[in-house]
Image (cartoon, helix red, strand yellow):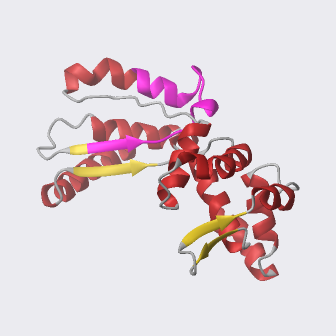
Amino acid sequence: EESKARLNYAFRILLRVVASYFAPLVILLDDIQWSDAATLDLIEVLITDRDNPSGLMVIGVYRSNEVDETHILSQVVCQLESKADQADFMLTEIKIGNLDLEQTNEIIMVLLSIDESDKTLGLARVCHKRSYGNVFSLLVFLEMLKVEGLLEFNIGEFKWTWDEERILSETAATANVVDLMRQKMEKLPLDVRNRLPLAAC
């Protein structure tokens, strides 16, 4: 318990020093649904530090479908909500869902610099079906289409071209982007594939 208190104190001092040079300091923590109790305790200690004179913003990103009321993260969030007024900080929750077809189409229009929505709607349908409306999956899928030559920029016509039927047929074996990523990894050299599990830790 004493070593934990010393560690928390050291992190508070470190953050105060860093925040004094880079104010406001923004810390982004991704996939915090996988954090252990000690890490979440440390985050709480840093957020509730009233003696930090500089601005600190902690952005915690997590997958809500992996967190229920009994999850440790839910408990920490409840504790922070109860301490917000007393410790003088704000806690804001923003829920982000998957894209619908229209939003998928708008992103594709922006990425391909196309102003008319009906020109990209067919491509958007295919992309939405393969990505399930997940933004990251959508971008990965579009990149894969480009790499595989299914989405090309025609220099002569100065526009992007694609064939929806060809995209549907050539990506039919991959129900979603996870399958695409798996196939992409299988094309890597064997020594790289063997190192991937180590890099993922």
What is the span of residues highlighted in magenta in the rendered image? 57-78
Q: Is residue 201 visible?
A: no
- Residue drawn at point x = 51 percent, y = 46 percent: 106
Q: How many numbered marks have been drawn onto this rendered protein structure?
A: 0
In the picture, measured across the screen, residue 117 lies left or right of residue 179, that is: left
Residue 75 counted in the magenta span: yes
Placement of 161 over or under 47, stated as above or below: below
Residue 57: x and y, percent? 27, 43
- Residue drawn at point x = 33 percent, y = 50 percent: 27
In the picture, measured across the screen, residue 161 lies left or right of residue 3, that is: right
Quarter of the image where one finds residue 129: top right
- Residue positioned most to the front: 157
Residue 71: x and y, percent? 58, 27
Residue 92 counted in the magenta span: no
Q: Is residue 12 visible?
A: yes
Q: Quadrant of the C terminus?
A: bottom right
